[in-house]
Image (cartoon, helix red, strand yellow):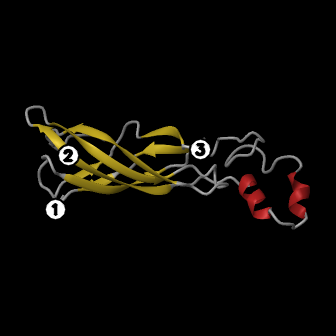
Amino acid sequence: SEGGLRFAEKEGIDYAATTVQLPGGERVPFMFTVKELVAQSTSKTIAPGTEFSGTFRVPSYRSGLFLDPKGRGGTTGYDMAQGLPGMEADGAEGQAELAGETNKVFQVTDGSLEFAVNKVDEATGEWSGVFVSEQLSDTDMGSKVPKKVLIKGIVSGRVDTYNGSEEY
């Protein structure tokens, strides 16, 4: 791109359902992903020290076809579990929490990623480096407040000659 390099995720397996356990035992599910990542660099070459940053889309941890243990889902299943209509009709406290558990939604959020190149093999075009990614955890289809997930790791790739005939 103008002024620097552009890194774009195009195809392949671009997500992994993941769960981490916090030091207290709480488990946090999230969709580890770089779906639709577009990262920019001000550098014009891949070399040690080249840095990229960009944003990506984080799909919901569960699809609309997922059913919870009471048979409720976003596109399939029951509208509500048995026994809940009477509880919702009284107007008492706790209705917002109950509505969140009953009304399932498919949420797509934004994430961000930064990575830096540490090594480059000019003979093969391969490079490696480190990344830091920030995204939100699962919301259990709208019933829970998401946690901010910070992921750090190693990234690698290969630069190839672009000739315009590539199909994505």
Q: Where is 13 relative to 112, above or below?
A: above
Q: Position of residue 9 (x, y in %)?
A: 32, 46
Residue at which label 2 appears: 117
Q: Position of residue 139 (x, y in %)?
A: 60, 52
Q: Amino acid at mark 2?
A: Val
Q: Position of residue 20 (x, y in %)?
A: 52, 40
Residue at which label 1 appears: 2
First of labels 1, 3 by sequence position: 1
Label 1 crowding class (10 Å Cα cut-off): few <14, some 14-19, many 20+? Answer: few
- Checking the image for residue 24, the label placed there is 3
Q: Quadrant of residue 156?
A: top left
Quick one: SS at disc 3? loop
Separation of residues labelled 1 and 3 (CA atoms): 48 Å
Q: Position of residue 104 (x, y in %)?
A: 68, 52
Horizontal side of residue 114 vs 100, given as left or right: left
First of labels 1, 2 by sequence position: 1
| Residue at the limit of the structure toward the left, as seen here | 123
Quarter of the rendering occupied by the C terminus: top left
Camera-side residue of 83 and 23: 23
The residue that appears at 80% across and 63% down in the rendered structure is 95
Q: Quadrant of residue 100?
A: bottom right
Q: Amino acid at mark 3?
A: Gly
Camera-side residue of 56 and 151: 151
Camera-side residue of 124 and 28: 28
Q: Are marks 3 and 2 in contact (CB under 8 Å)?
A: no
Quick one: SS at disc 2? strand
Quarter of the rendering occupied by the N terminus: bottom left
